[in-house]
Image (tube, grey):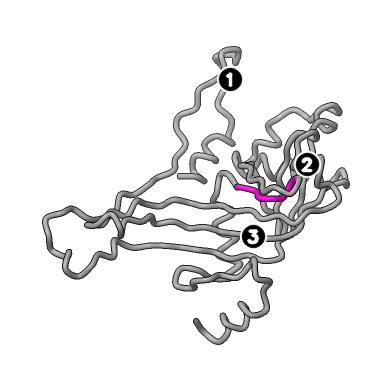
């Protein structure tokens, strides 16, 4: 660990420190890159003195992450005043197959962020967040949709988490076998894991002449 990394680690609260730096970093730009490439985030918070982890759609705007859900859900309803929270996005790039079960692993990129989540009460910020979440999955989709109804706004809650601490863990490369296993006839290598969006299927009530909107191929390109 470099002297700079040691200083950064010493300044962090214990919960945000990376224990083993061989795969970890505090590179915020790398964390943003991983967050922007992910499809789903796992959000952790405490409810009634118990840990809760919920998979949610999300979007990043600058140094802030936005998640949304029904206004009656626990993560929204009970955390309007602010709650310590964490959010993790993991991208799996490959299965690492070694000659021994002990050395099997995965190639992955993971971003972990910590901050305080609270309810968005400003209407303009709420709309911008909902647009960003929609467009994160389907670029340009917000403008293709009809305007939200008042009852839909009322039924939706948006939480914002300002990123206070960010770290990453990344593994790349092939298996790390014991020297005595090298060259044996047991196969070893990497099985790539690819995330891709398939061909879209129109809903049964969509008129046949209706073209697939631009947001769909944009999403397929983004997550190719």
Vertical position of residue 90 compared to residue 181: above or below = above
Which disc number belongs to residue 30?
A: none
Judge the density around disc 3: few (<14), some (14-19), many (≥20) Cα neighbours within 10 Å.
many
Q: Position of residue 72 (x, y in %)?
A: 80, 33
What secondary structure predominates along the stretch shown in magenta? Answer: strand
Q: Is residue 45 magenta?
A: yes
Which disc number belongs to residue 210?
A: 1
Q: Is residue 6 magenta?
A: no
Q: CA distance from mark 3 to mark 1?
A: 41 Å
* Residue 182 as seen in the image, left or right of residue 88: left
Say which residue label 3 marks. Answer: 113
Residue contact between numbered discs 3 and 2, judged by CB atoms under 8 Å = no
* Magenta extent: 42-47
Judge the density around disc 1: few (<14), some (14-19), many (≥20) Cα neighbours within 10 Å.
few
Check disc 3 and report its element: helix, strand or loop.
Answer: strand
Q: CA distance from mark 1 to mark 2?
A: 36 Å
Q: Which residue appears at 56% of the width and 24% of the height?
A: 211
* Residue 156 as seen in the image, left or right of residue 37: right
Check disc 1 and report its element: helix, strand or loop.
Answer: loop
- Counting residues from the start of the chain, the first of labels 3 and 1 encountered is 3
Say which residue label 2 marks. Answer: 76
Vertical position of residue 131 compared to residue 16: above or below = above
């Amino acid at each position: 660990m470099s002297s700079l990394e040691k200083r950064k680690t010493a300044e962090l609260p214990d919960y945000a420190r990376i224990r083993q730096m061989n795969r970890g970093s505090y590179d915020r730009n790398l964390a943003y890159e991983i967050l922007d490439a992910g499809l789903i985030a796992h959000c952790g918070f405490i409810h009634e003195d118990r840990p809760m982890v919920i998979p949610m759609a999300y979007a990043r705007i600058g140094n802030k992450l936005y998640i949304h859900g029904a206004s009656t859900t626990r993560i929204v309803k009970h955390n309007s005043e602010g709650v310590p929270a964490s959010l993790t996005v993991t991208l799996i790039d490959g299965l690492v197959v070694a000659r021994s079960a002990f050395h099997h692993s995965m190639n992955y990129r993971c971003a972990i962020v910590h901050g305080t989540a609270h309810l968005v009460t400003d209407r303009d910020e709420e709309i911008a967040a909902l647009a960003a979440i929609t467009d994160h999955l389907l670029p340009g989709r917000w403008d293709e949709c009809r305007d939200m109804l008042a009852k839909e706004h009322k039924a939706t809650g948006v939480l914002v988490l300002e990123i206070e601490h960010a770290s990453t863990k990344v593994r790349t490369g092939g298996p790390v076998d014991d020297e005595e296993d090298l060259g044996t006839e047991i196969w070893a290598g990497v099985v790539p894991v690819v995330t891709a969006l398939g061909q879209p299927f129109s809903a049964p009530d969509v008129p046949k002449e209706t073209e697939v909107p631009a947001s769909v191929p944009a999403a397929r390109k983004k997550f190719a």
